[in-house]
Amino acid sequence: IFPYLEALMNYKNDLTVVLIILIVGILIGAGIWLYNSVIKPRSDKDKNIQAIEEFDRNVEIDKTGENQEKEENKAQESINVSIDPTNSTNPVQPNIKVKKKTYYEGYVMIGYITIPKTNVKLPILDSVTPEALNTAVAALYPSNPKLNQPGNVVIVGHNYKNGQFFSNNKNLQLGDKIKIKDTTGTELTYTIYEKF
């Protein structure tokens, strides 16, 4: 009877080890799933919101600067100033206006897209690389896209199965709205009129 008890004890020890390995594997798998499905999308959404808020602030600053520049130009129109180009103490410097760019994960934002029905609000990047497309959506066509201008623009993004990026576009119907805001501060609303 002792050999049978000894074999049974060894069998129990083996089962205990297998059970511990199985439980650890399940916990690791659940942790990875939780991170990829809940934690990472939430932090990505927070980064998106911060980048979009910064983009809106930069657009507002540019608009304010343009309005001040217009007022200064009106004030200067009434003053006649003669500048001697040979006088090196009064160099003429051209008025160069550089818009402040907004960056998202190292890529330049040219706007953002909002799809209310699918709860999408994503930066639109100017770069169409695999790394950029893993970060947000991008304007693919034409090569130097200008959002909200006459003509065609193609905005591309991943169609993941975890609810990220354009994965819920399949739920859009005719008549649903898509909003795009560009670097001039213009936000246009587009209506879906055909699906294929």
Image: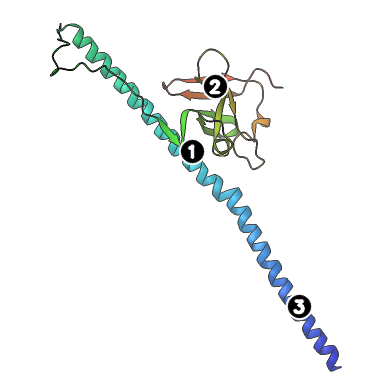
Residues at marks 1 and 2, CA–CA distance in whole angstroms: 24 Å
Q: Name the residue type under label 1.
A: Asn
Q: Name the residue type under label 3.
A: Asp
Q: Which residue is mark 3?
A: 14
Within 10 Å of the Cα at label 1, are there few (<14), some (14-19), or many (20+) other Cα atoms? many
- Foreground disc of the pair 2, 3: 2
The mark nearer the N terminus, 1 or 2, is 1
Give yes or no for contact between labels 1 and 2 (Cβ–Cβ under 8 Å).
no
Q: Quadrant of the C terminus?
A: top right
Q: Position of residue 15 (x, y in %)?
A: 76, 76
Q: Position of residue 156 (x, y in %)?
A: 60, 29
The mark nearer the N terminus, 2 or 3, is 3
Q: Which residue is mark 1?
A: 48
Within 10 Å of the Cα at label 2, are there few (<14), some (14-19), or many (20+) other Cα atoms? few
The mark nearer the N terminus, 1 or 3, is 3
Q: Residue at x 74, y 80 (%)?
A: 13
Q: What label does residue 143 carry, if any?
A: 2
Residues at marks 2 and 3, CA–CA distance in whole angstroms: 62 Å
Q: Quadrant of the N terminus?
A: bottom right
Q: In this orientation, which residue lies closer to the viewer: 6 or 189?
A: 6
Number of numbered discs on residues = 3
Q: Position of residue 51 (x, y in %)?
A: 44, 36
Q: Name the residue type under label 2.
A: Ser
- Which residue, as the protein is rendered here, is positioned at the far bottom? 2
Q: In this orientation, which residue lies closer to the viewer: 139 or 113?
A: 139
Q: Position of residue 62 (x, y in %)?
A: 34, 24
Q: In this orientation, which residue lies closer to the viewer: 60 or 72?
A: 72
- Going by the image, does 161 lie left or right of 82? right
Q: Is residue 193 above or below residue 161?
A: above
Provide the secondary structure element on which disc 1 rests. Answer: helix
- Going by the image, does 117 lie left or right of 10? left
